Amino acid sequence: MDPTARLLAACRRQPVDRPPIWIMRQAGRYMPSYREVRKRVSFMELCRTPEIACEVTMMPIDQLGLDAAILFSDILVPLESMGQKIYFDKAGPHCEPAVRSAADIDKLTVDGAVDGVSYVYDAVSLIKKTLNGRAPLLGFAGAPLTLATYAIEGGTSKHKHEIRRLIYTEPAAMHRLLDKLATVITEYLRRQIQAGADAVQLFDTWGGMLTEAEWRTFSMPYTARIMEGIADLGAPILHYCLGSAHLTPALAELPCDVLSVDWRQSLSSIREATGGRYALQGNIEAGILRAEPHHIEAAAKACLDDYGTGPGHIVNLGHGITPDVSVAAAKHLVECVQRYGRERAR
Ligand code: CP3
């Protein structure tokens, strides 16, 4: 089956010869070839240079034989053209100055922000051309709530007290920030799709820190607005939220095609809870990639068996691949999923 047709069919819950597999963070530090590139350029320089972003995007396609490519970039990239300085070091990402007040939010740019990252769309076109139909290309963005978390905390934060403070004490300012982010991200994803992305994933990584009522207030309306704002382009929309079991009833109202499930929940239970109305993506626990090959094979089978029969499964990990994994282990997982997936489909 044509690889692009396979992914698009799986997203739309149509029959496939076998479920496709790709891996969140598939181009990254676990690959010696990626680490070589990073000796030469900083992470942001990599994102800003379409030729290098393309080279890195192709690495897991060439080395692992995955069924989809994902644009090499980061969810924080658009915050830079909205006015924050973004950089990465050993402590993780930094977004400076942190957005802490209504006045800070007013200073963030919306007009021109999408044009400010035209290198992203150039990378998408170049990758699409380089792939030449070998694999479909996923674009992506952060959901407003998750981007707001980084913008407000100023980077990675364990307790996320600053965003909680803003939610509790200045909800109107928080809504103003989320509104700005939703406007930018809608156009940002439209431009990625117009440049050649076959499908797009929205990462609401930190949505799970909220209660269902809070998520319905501070994340869902903005995420749904983005999904509705790109629907006419016809590219399937995938949604990922970490630690979101308590949000399942709300997630099952999102206007998207695919829900990406983390490793804590069984795919069969989410399939049942969502009435089979969504394709599901996931959800092998990433730590299995440090185990011996036969354990990896067992995990691949367990994941496919858990989803069960019928279309609408895209295999992935439950979260991003970690730097301590070998390329050989990741490749073994891909081969097991592809082989067992094909056998089961017969
Ligand atoms: O999946 C891919 O291969 C595509 C590229 C991609 C990256 N980040 C590359 C990256 C994607 C889709 C992301 C998404 C992203 N970025 C998310 C959502 C997904 C998730 O993991 O929940 C989030 C929360 C971020 C923010 C981010 N970027 C953090 C917290 C970090 C530091 C921690 C870490 O894992 O290094 C990054 C840096 C980052 N983004 C790296 C890569 C390959 C490592 C940078 C390096 O080379 O040093």
Image: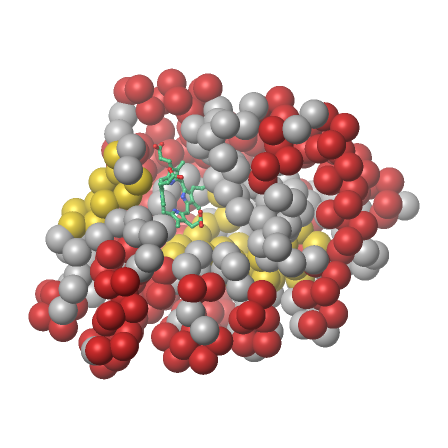
Is 229 displayed left or right of 259 in the figure?
left
Ligand 1 rendered quadrant: top left
The foreground one among 249 and 228 is 249
Return the x and y of residue 298 as percentages of the image width and height.
Answer: 77, 37
Q: Residue at x 28, y 55 (%)?
A: 150
Residue for point 46% across, 69% down: 227
Q: Nearer the viewer, residue 168 or 186?
A: 168
Question: Considering only vertical position in the picture, is 321 above or below 279?
Answer: above
**Which scheme is used to colour this image of the protein?**
secondary structure
Percent from the top left, x then y, of residue 314? Answer: 66, 51
Q: Nearer the viewer, residue 135 or 346?
A: 346
Quarter in which the C terminus is drawn: top right
- Measured as percent of width and height from the top left, residue 195 is found at 41, 50
Percent of width and height locating residue 144 = 35, 65
Above or below residue 234? Residue 7 is: above
Say if residue 112 shows up in the picture: no
Quarter-of-image position of residue 38: top left
Is residue 258 something that shows in the picture? Answer: yes
